[in-house]
Amino acid sequence: MQISSVFDSGNIECVSADNPADIRLNIRKDNGSDFYQWFYFRLTGARGIPVTLTIENAGKSAYPAGWKDYQAVVSSDRENWERAATRYENGELVIEHTPLADAVWFAYFAPYTMTRHDELIAACQHSETAKLDVIGRTLDGRDLDRLVIGEPGEGKKTIWVIARQHPGESMAEWAAEGFLSRLLDDADPVAIDLLSKAVFHVVPNMNPDGSYRGHLRTNAKGVNLNREWDKASQENSPEVHAVLTEMKKTGVDLFLDMHGDEDLPYNFIAGAEGVPGFTQQDGELLNAYKDALARLNPDFQTKHGYPVDAPGSADLSIATHWMAKAFSCLAMTLEMPFKDNANRPDPQFGWSPERCVKLGASQLDAMREVFDRL
């Protein structure tokens, strides 16, 4: 048997793979950081053999509470990802599976590789309503892609959508794919209506380096991009710096940042309630968006989420908080689970790429619901 992860988005260290009943593994830390939790690797040579894979350092990962009730995903074609029997005990994550093919891939969540990102960009640029530009370069020299969708015009609003500041949160780019696919559908009446009134700026992957390297939370230098918005620099966070430079040119009327949460088994939105100057009217607009999304897509809910910050106490290094302060706009963070959606569980697939895509597409409905209040 062989364990490998030297590929796009891969991450694992093999301690031993001599005994199929006791394969021992460790997750590699993000470069320049102590963060780790994302894993993605291939097992070969175990067709028809029951295997037990133990990730020894799971207990010291970034969010060990996230392993409770978590199930890893497995695939033999890297297209269809099912949940594998998984348990967390004594600080170790134990995965049990019987491969039905010569090679199978295991991951923390269905990967969204840089190869797939390139395919998404290639597909989107062929739409007559989309324009692709490179707004910056990462520390590893990768392009930071932005898609501008819609024609500028007098009185039009400006909407920015970004995803995957934390590269291990691959569900964020799955949702961005769904958002873009629908926005570029020239037969979708909601998309057509929104594009008559707004221009969209979409960065589907804020962290190409971390994505390729198999990081959980940081860029190539070990910097958490979602703690850089009040101090972005070319030296530490050129990704954020590039986006902010463009935002200053366009202005922002609505900002949506797509993420994943390791612990909570729900889809929810975190707002900017703790930002200085956040008003009752701002809260009503935020709640209107969330209520609309919950009504339009049953995978979304408003009961569970992060505690609301006390007035004036928000961490302004976080994108949603900084955007609300800097642009006085509706700013939100969409969080999706690594686990199953507890309100609508699916034992075979859990929270899946397909459902991420649908939830991403549903953002257009919610945006249309509140658009006249922006």
Image (cartoon, rainbow, N blue to C red):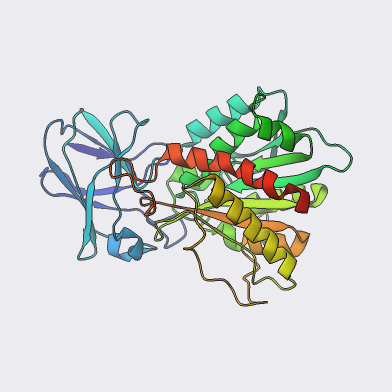
**Residue 249, position in %: x, y?**
82, 48
Q: Is residue 119 left or right of residue 55?
A: right
In the rendered image of this protein, does residue 336 appear above or below residue 153? below
**Residue 163, position in %: x, y?**
57, 47
Pick whichever, 139 or 178, lies toward us.
178
**Is any part of residue 49 visible from this angle?**
yes
In the rendered image of this protein, does residue 331 appear above or below residue 351? below
Q: Is residue 28 left or right of residue 361?
A: left
Picture quarter with the N terminus = top left
Q: Residue at x 18, y 30 (%)?
A: 100
**Residue 126, position in %: x, y?**
65, 22
Q: Residue at x 61, y 35 (%)?
A: 180
Pick whichever, 171 or 28, lies toward us.
171
Given the current orientation, which residue lies at the most extreme front position? 295
Given the current orientation, which residue lies at the most extreme right position? 154
Give the image quarter of residue 225: bottom right
Pick whichever, 177 or 25, lies toward us.
177
**Residue 129, position in %: x, y?**
72, 27
**Is any part of residue 278 visible from this angle?**
no
Q: Residue at x 24, y 64 (%)?
A: 91
Count up the numbered dots.
0
Q: Is residue 133 left or right of residue 263?
A: right
Q: Residue at x 72, y 23 (%)?
A: 128
